[in-house]
Image: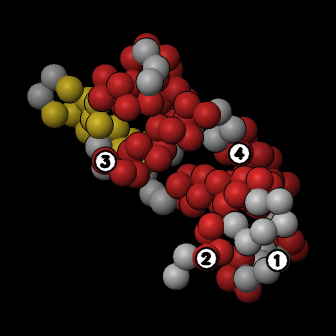
Amino acid sequence: MHADKKIDLATVSSDQIDLASEVLTLLSDPTRIRIVLTLQENGELSVNALAEAVGKKPSGVSQHLARMRMARMVTTRQQGTSVLYRLVDEHALTLIVEALNQAEHAVAHGQLPPHHREG
């Protein structure tokens, strides 16, 4: 385990643990994972562009974005008549990358997963 990922349990409040659980629950949806990855790759996108990129209807993507916005994972910017969405920071992406790395371990069948071979 990496030293920079250690958490001093004595400094973590019960409220923080509850909120962390809510964040993980929010990110447990495949469409939301695709939205985060797409925003990371493209910067800012409209609902329609995101919907096309993730293969879902705009109305459904809009609902996902509303929940993500309430959780302060995404923010918006008005450009003319369009609303553009972008990630607030890299934390949601970091969680998803770690989950994807864990998924690689799950399917590696005892072999070294690809993310350990990089660099």
13 lies left or right of 2? right
Residue 59: image location, x then y, percent = 43, 13
Question: The disc labelled 3 sits on which kind of residue?
Answer: Asn
Look at discs 1 and 4 and give the one toward the viewer: 4
Instruction: Establish if 89 lies above or below 114.
Output: above
Q: Report, in whole angstroms, how far the alpha carbon at label 4 lies from the one at label 3.
A: 23 Å
Identify the amino acid type marked 2. Arg
The residue shown at (61%, 34%) is 30
Circle 2 sits on which residue?
A: 117
> Is there CB contact under 8 Å for labels 4 and 3?
no
Q: Tell me which amino acid carries mark 4.
A: Leu
Residue 67: x %, y % from top left: 55, 29
Report the mark closest to the observer, 4 or 3: 3
- The residue indicated by pointer 3 is 42
Of callouts 1 and 4, which one flags the residue occurring earlier in the amino acid sequence?
1
For marks 4 and 2 on the same chain, the one whose residue lies earlier in the sequence? 4
| Gap between marks 2 and 3 measured at Cα | 26 Å
Residue 24 is labelled as 4
One can see residue 16 in this view: no
Picture disc at residue 8: 1
Q: Secondary structure at mark 4?
A: helix
Q: Position of residue 93 (x, y in %)?
A: 53, 55
